[in-house]
Amino acid sequence: MSQQLGDAKLSLLANRMRERKPPTLSMAPMIDCVFLLLIFFMVSTTFSPIPGLRVQLPPPGKPSPDKPKGLTVRIANPEAGEEQGTMVLNDVVVQVEEMFNQFINAPDESKNMLIIQSERDVLHEQIVQVMDIAKQAGIDKIGFAIVARD
């Protein structure tokens, strides 16, 4: 009888082992920890300011009627389907490829400053390209001007 009782307990234990489900890992506490770490790193991170160009803006008031001495590049809005606008250097239409030679061959008294006038929809890429060419040609002062609206 004791052996039957032992066999019954053993078969009951074997049935429980067969029915046992594998342990599961709950994802909710792990997600909570990840969010807490994310918030911690976002709060403790310091951002350094990115250095940029220093621009000296004119004081507010009426624009000066005097035309500044130097080279003037006017950049028109690009036509439909074109990437770059038309560039006019001192009333002469120029291409980007010709601009360096035009700057180098300019009279010395006008080579000290470049004034860039661009319309509203001109890409910054084109303006920066003109600035780079001017720097390569030895023009140190670059100004920006706008055309007064009527």
Image (cartoon, helix red, strand yellow):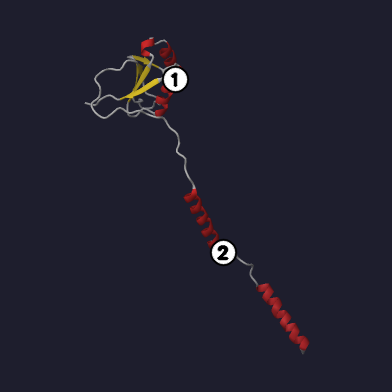
Q: Is residue 21 above or below residue 43?
A: below
Q: Amino acid at mark 1?
A: Lys
Residue at screen point 24% across, 20% down: 65
- Rendered-image quadrant of the N terminus: bottom right
* Mark 2 surroundings: few (<14), some (14-19) or many (≥20) residues within 10 A: few
The quadrant in which residue 8 appears is: bottom right
Front residue of 141/116: it is 141
Residue at screen point 76% across, 86% down: 4
Residue to which mark 2 is pinned: 26
The quadrant in which residue 18 appears is: bottom right
Left or right placement of residue 146 versus residue 100 in this view: left
The quadrant in which residue 150 appears is: top left
Q: Amino acid at mark 2?
A: Ser
Q: Which of the numbered marks, if any, corresponds to residue 135?
A: 1
Location of residue 138 in the rendering, given as x and y in whole percent from the top left corner: 44, 16
Q: Is residue 100 above or below residue 52?
A: above
Q: Is residue 125 above or below residue 2?
A: above
